[in-house]
Image: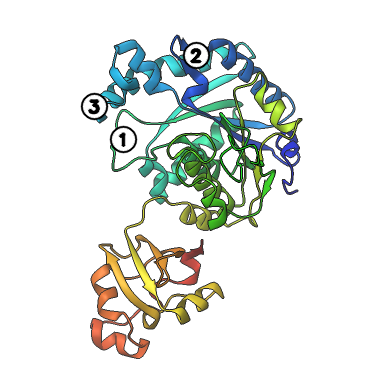
Amino acid sequence: MQITALSDLADPARCPRLVVKVGSALLVDADGPRRAWIAALVSELAAARARGQDVIVVSSGAIALGARTLGLDKGGRGSLADAQAAAAVGQIALSGLWAELLAQHGLTAAQLLLTLDDLEDRRRYLNATATLSRLLDAGAVPVINENDSVATQEIRFGDNDRLAARVAQAARASAVLLLSDVDGLYDRNPADPAAERLAVVRGVTPAIHAMADGGSGSGLGSGGMTSKLQAAEIAELAGIALAIGNGAPEAPMARITQGGIGTLFLPRGKARARKAWLGGRLRLKGTLTVDPGAAQALLGGASLLAKGISGVAGEFARGDAVGIADTAGAVLAHGLVEYDADECRLLLGRHSNEHAALLGYAPRPAIVHRDQLVLR
């Protein structure tokens, strides 16, 4: 059964597995952890478990907690070293708090710290999937955060919104709930009296992205709503629903699901596991630019042939993930490439019957085969 309304997130038949992401501002204030609020949220998570839903928590807050303990400026984000040190200290306190409060409801917490590479590398992604599946089968509640103690500025998710969407893919979840500090996505700055909340979004289009331009379009500060829309794109490609709602009130999950106050991003048709992983990747090794004819063929389900490629950017090896873009720079697809970058440059624009002479060996059927390609 498909998820079509916010109320479905509380229905075990329509949403048997739910990922709930909680941001730092909801978990921590100037006095430390917001223990009473977290305890109330844990009660809601326990209620979801009691009605038959698997629950996964993606929890921010480690850096904020650690910075407070260590007395670091700028909330621990003054430098990469400060953030890593703060995370190392704060993660202990954060995981201990979740474990304590979940235990009060007879639930076992399990901590997973993930890096970007854990979900971008196919083998490590499958390992994460297996671990999550076994924990849920055993009745545990996984509590997940980015491994900020070892993540670098270049190789990281950068926000837990996108991490939550990728975790939902790995866990084969039905939906993601992003608890934020606004009631959902608005068509303009919510401070504008004419602003209207979008109840349902069917596809994250350029027009939807424009509503979050400037960072403060939905009152979340720089990049806040933009990262949530990126998470919605990852989720929808995998056939996973995603909702944004206000986490600040008491019992926020009930307010969102029973009161219908939030924005629901509807999924596309359920993607095969490999294509969901590929479509949700955040790091690509390069880009292949294609001409209009090749772009049309891709949209029609064809493989990418060298004849339709007009440009090659980046350095990549066979099997790496690349983006496929049109001449205007819009990304049409992600795919696993059959040749390295230099070979692609050698073959671009050439007919297939020329490939053997150019390469010196029997060529492969396509630059990116349709079975290793997912449209954006």
The circle drawn on residue 151 is: 1
Relative to 179, say whether 194 is above or below. below
Rounded to the nearest angstrom, the CA distance separating label 3 from label 1 is 10 Å
Locate residue 365, reporting x and y percent: 41, 79
Locate residue 284, reporting x and y percent: 36, 56
The amino acid type, in three-letter code, at marker 2 is Leu
Q: Mark 2 and mark 3 in contact (Cβ < 8 Å)?
A: no
The amino acid type, in three-letter code, at marker 1 is Ala
Q: Is residue 70 left or right of residue 197?
A: left
Q: Earlier in the sequence, mark 3 or mark 2?
A: 3
Q: Earlier in the sequence, mark 3 or mark 1?
A: 3
Q: Nearer the viewer, mark 3 or mark 1?
A: 3
Rounded to the nearest angstrom, the CA distance separating label 1 from label 2 is 23 Å
Report the residue at 44% width, 45% height from top: 125
View extreme (front): residue: 193
Q: Is residue 89 left or right of residue 217?
A: left
Per the image, the residue denoted by label 3 is 81
Per the image, the residue denoted by label 2 is 97
Q: Mark 1 and mark 3 in contact (Cβ < 8 Å)?
A: no
Q: Mark 2 and mark 1 in contact (Cβ < 8 Å)?
A: no
The circle drawn on residue 51 is: none
Q: Is residue 1 visible?
A: yes
Depth check: 235 or 132 in front? 235
Rounded to the nearest angstrom, the CA distance separating label 3 from label 2 is 25 Å
